[in-house]
């Protein structure tokens, strides 16, 4: 299984993990509410995970312009 982290704002790939033994528990996904999971995590047809997070650049931009923050539409 692999996990790919992409920025939900700009689509940039932030990083990825390739580990056949990693679990959602190790990734911390169990901390998410079902609603958050629906928005953040998706699965590819290969069974890999895509986690839509936020990159440093967009994080900074949001801190400067909080009104931009409406990502879950
Ligand atoms: Zn970004």
Image (spheres, helix red, strand yellow):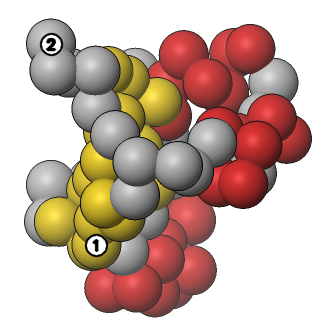
As helix, strand or loop, the secondary structure at mark 1 comes to strand
| Precedes in sequence: disc 2 or disc 1 | 1
Residue at image position (27%, 73%) is 14
Residue 58 x/y as whole percent:
35, 74
Callout 1: CB less than 8 Å from ligand 1 = no
Q: Which residue is mark 1?
A: 15
Q: Is residue 34 left or right of residue 14?
A: right
Q: Which residue is mark 2?
A: 45
Q: Position of residue 60 (x, y in %)?
A: 46, 86
For the point 65% across and 39% down, which residue is it?
24
Please indicate whether residue 14 sits to the left or right of residue 63 in the image: left
Q: Indicate which disc residue 60 carries.
A: none
Q: Position of residue 73 (x, y in %)?
A: 40, 21
Q: Nearer the viewer, residue 9 or 65?
A: 9
Residue 6 visible in image:
yes
Q: Up-down: is 27 above or below 59?
A: above
Quadrant containing the N terminus in the rendered view = top left
In the foreground, 46 or 51 = 46
């Amino acid at each position: 299984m692999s996990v790919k982290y992409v920025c939900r704002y700009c689509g940039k790939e932030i990083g990825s993990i390739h580990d056949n033994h990693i679990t959602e528990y190790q990734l911390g996904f169990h901390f998410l509410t079902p609603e958050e999971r629906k928005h953040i995590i998706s699965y590819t047809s290969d069974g890999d995970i895509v986690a839509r997070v936020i990159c440093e650049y967009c994080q900074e931009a949001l801190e400067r312009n909080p009104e931009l923050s409406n990502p879950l539409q």
